[in-house]
């Protein structure tokens, strides 16, 4: 096996990393070199895939030798309640194949490189803090680490990866919804020209189910709903105000619409005769990402084809 070590420059986190490894504190203007994992972590086919992803996207897919300190590196503390374990070789093959077939095949390095934090941990049974659950829970995705993200598609309740296309779609969409909005936040991808001209971000909205015909109902105004982080469905009830729908939040909703629903499902959820703006804006986003970045939201919705 080709052996080399990750040498990661963490200039902004020298103090934190020094405490973690109990190294001498270095001046803040001196880059700190941290070697935490051997990479690649083996010589299997999935290790070669991990090397390719690092070369293309600059992120290390790490699946073993992960401990609790690794999972709790945050801006707040090195000691938290996040937990999980690295993968066996059998689990690693399954998880790497998922990342290859359901995630990275839909991305474009020219648009996405620089979006990820340095490490992307593939973890079994990850348990961490979730704002939407008001506490800790078993999570599919976690992106709050200081220098890492977590993907955890296998756990004690689901020790093997489902073959159900709808469940795989859920995992695919929820994972890519961590990546594409972050790409937008970092300026790697943009909204279509004139996209935000379709929205009034000032006039107050109405939200009642008895107000569906009101021109200020949020669906009429082109706002599809409230979408918690790492969710697969819009909240069933929404009582918020127009302040919920910032431009960035609204664009995130349309990234979700493009990869979550096919045309028939979208029509059933938001009939075009009643909510034409939602369909118009969704198509703008789908066309823009496909033409500008080679990212096909409709292909994500369909999933890998045999």
Image: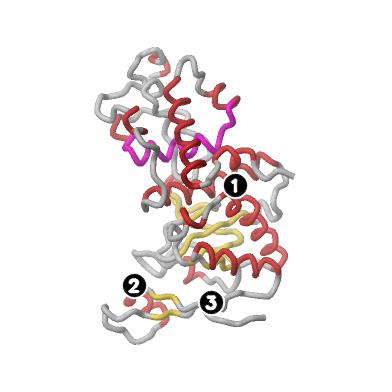
In x, y percent, where is residue 48?
65, 69
Q: Position of residue 6 (x, y in %)?
A: 50, 77
Range of magenta residues: 245-263
Which residue is drawn at the image coordinates 52% and 59% (left, top)?
150
Q: Are marks 3 and 1 in contact (CB under 8 Å)?
A: no
Numbered disc 2: secondary structure: helix
Query: Which residue has dot 1 on it?
Result: 171
Q: Which residue is mark 3?
A: 37
Question: Which x, y percent locates residue 247?
Answer: 33, 38
Label 3, secondary structure: give it.
loop
Q: Nearer the viewer, residue 286 or 264?
A: 286
Asked if residue 202 is among those painted magenta in the image, a careful observer would answer: no
- The numbered mark at residue 111 is none
* Residue at the disc numbered 2: 13
Q: Residue furthest bottom?
A: 24
Does 207 sit above or below residue 108?
above
Q: Residue at x 40, y 70 (%)?
A: 78
């Amino acid at each position: 096996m080709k052996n080399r070590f990750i040498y990661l420059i963490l200039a902004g986190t020298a103090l934190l990393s020094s405490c973690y490894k109990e190294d001498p504190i270095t001046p803040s203007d001196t880059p700190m070199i941290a070697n935490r994992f051997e990479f690649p972590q083996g010589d299997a086919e999935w290790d070669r895939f991990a090397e390719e992803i690092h070369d293309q996207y600059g992120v290390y897919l790490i699946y073993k030798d992960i401990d609790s300190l690794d999972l709790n590196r945050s801006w707040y503390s090195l000691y938290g309640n996040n937990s999980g374990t690295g993968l066996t070789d059998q689990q690693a093959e399954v998880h790497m194949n998922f990342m290859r077939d359901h995630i990275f095949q839909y991305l474009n390095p020219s648009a996405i490189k620089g979006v990820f934090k340095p490490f992307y941990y593939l973890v079994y049974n990850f348990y961490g803090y979730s704002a939407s659950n008001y506490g800790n829970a078993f999570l599919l995705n976690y992106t709050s680490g200081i220098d890492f993200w977590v993907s955890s598609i296998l756990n004690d309740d689901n020790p093997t990866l489902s073959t159900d296309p709808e469940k795989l779609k859920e995992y695919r969409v929820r994972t890519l919804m961590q990546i594409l909005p972050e790409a937008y936040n970092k300026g790697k991808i943009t909204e279509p020209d004139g996209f935000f001209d379709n929205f009034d971000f000032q006039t107050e909205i109405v939200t009642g189910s008895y107000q569906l015909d009101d021109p200020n109902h949020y669906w009429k105004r082109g706002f599809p709903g409230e979408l918690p982080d790492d969710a697969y469905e819009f909240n069933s009830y929404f009582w918020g105000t127009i302040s919920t729908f910032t431009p960035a939040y609204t664009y995130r909703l349309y990234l979700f619409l493009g990869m979550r629903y096919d045309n028939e499902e979208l029509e059933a959820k938001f009939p075009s005769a009643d909510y034409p703006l939602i369909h118009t804006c969704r198509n703008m986003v789908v066309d823009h990402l496909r033409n500008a970045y080679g990212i096909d939201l409709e292909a994500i919705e369909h999933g890998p084809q045999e």
